[in-house]
Image (cartoon, rainbow, N blue to C red):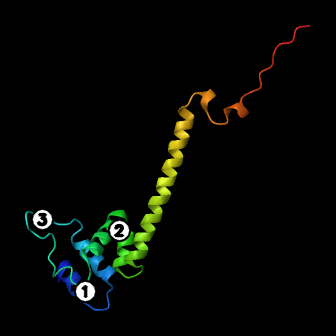
Amino acid sequence: MSGRAFVKSRSERRDLSKGERAMGLAFLYPEPEKGGRGKKAQNDKETLGFSRMRLSQARAVLRHSRELAEAVRDGTIKLDEALERIQNERKELESAEAQRGLLRKIMRAPAGKRRGSEARAAPQFKAQTC
């Protein structure tokens, strides 16, 4: 039995969640079809039981992490949980990038313009004449 036939027969089972079905189809078709004038991108029979949005979300999970996508497909975690993990990882990454950018900006600034450089600067002593 071919892989596509297996996934198709498996996706028609009632015990699979919509997220699992969407992920199975995302594995078969990782990129959406390009539709021309008046042509629908997806066959409605293939997406029976879940929305195109779910398929789009499943593809996003697959692009982010194959391991996470396999867990969704196998029913270990739900598609919504996987999406939440991706959002959290992106927020952490953006936060880390922002911190690195701030550090680069601070380090590129002249010594006198750096924040807090006045407190770290060595005290200047005037020579006293006797």
Task: Look at label 1 and name its amino acid.
Answer: Arg
Residue 32: image location, x then y, percent: 20, 66
Q: Which mark is residue 61?
A: 2
- Answer whether labels 3 and 2 touch (C-beta < 8 Å): no
Identified at 31% across, 87% down, the residue is 16
Task: Quickly name the residue at label 1.
Answer: 10
Which element is circle 1 on?
Answer: helix
Crowding near the residue tagged with mark 3, few <14, some 14–19, many ≥20 C-alpha atoms within 10 Å: few
Task: Look at label 2 and name its amino acid.
Answer: Val
Which badge, 2 or 1, is on the more N-terminal residue?
A: 1
Q: Which mark is residue 35?
A: 3
Crowding near the residue tagged with mark 1, few <14, some 14–19, many ≥20 C-alpha atoms within 10 Å: some
Quadrant location, the C terminus: top right
Task: Look at label 3 and name its amino acid.
Answer: Gly
As drawn, is 28 to the left or to the right of 95?
left
Which element is circle 3 on?
Answer: loop
Which badge, 3 or 2, is on the more N-terminal residue?
A: 3
Residue 18: image location, x then y, percent: 31, 83
Quadrant location, the N terminus: bottom left
Task: Report, in whole angstroms, how far the alpha carbon at label 3 lies from the one at label 2.
Answer: 23 Å
Task: Report, in whole angstroms, how far the alpha carbon at label 1 lies from the one at label 3.
Answer: 27 Å
As drawn, is 113 to the left or to the right of 12?
right
